[in-house]
Amino acid sequence: MKNPLVFVSLFTFLAIASCGPSEEEKVAAEKKSQDSIAAAKVQMQAAMEAARQQRVEDSIAVADSSITTVH
């Protein structure tokens, strides 16, 4: 009696485990991925803008220092 019960239990477990994610779960995972990509793009753009602003400020500082050393 134990043997058939073990096999039925194992079969039931494997049948449930083999079920993949539902369509809703797939859509949610795709949306999460797209949201993550969008957030990374925003962060990258902010970092690029900060670097550009720093280059401008550095250029101004160099120009100011060269003007003060000439006079």
Image (cartoon, grey):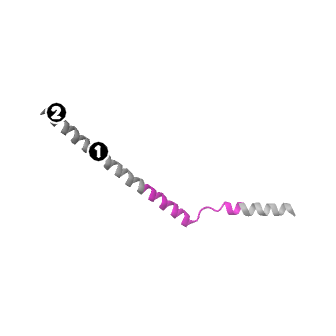
Q: Amino acid at mark 1?
A: Gln
Look at the image and tell me in which quarter the N terminus lies.
bottom right
Q: Residue furthest right?
A: 1
Q: Which percent across, then down, holds residue 66?
A: 18, 35
CB atoms at circles 1 and 2 under 8 Å apart? no
Q: Is residue 10 above or below residue 48?
A: below
Q: Amino acid at mark 2?
A: Thr
Q: Is residue 51 above or below residue 70?
A: below
SS label for mark 2 = helix
Viewer-side residue, 20 vs 69 = 69
Residue at the spot 21% in from the left edge and 42% down from the top edge = 60
Residue range (magenta): 14-37
Location of residue 39 by image quarter: bottom left
Q: Which mark is residue 54?
A: 1
Residue at the spot 78% in from the left edge and 63% down from the top edge = 8
Viewer-side residue, 67 vs 2 = 67
Q: Is residue 43 magenta?
A: no
Q: Which mark is residue 69?
A: 2
Q: Is residue 42 left or right of residue 60?
A: right
Q: Dot 2 surroundings within 10 Å: few (below 14), some, or many (20 or more)?
A: few
Q: Main secondary structure of the magenta part?
A: helix
Look at the image and tell me in which quarter the C terminus lies.
top left
Q: Quote the CA–CA distance across marks 1 and 2.
A: 22 Å
SS label for mark 1 = helix
Q: Which percent across, then down, holds residue 22?
A: 58, 65
Q: Is residue 15 magenta?
A: yes
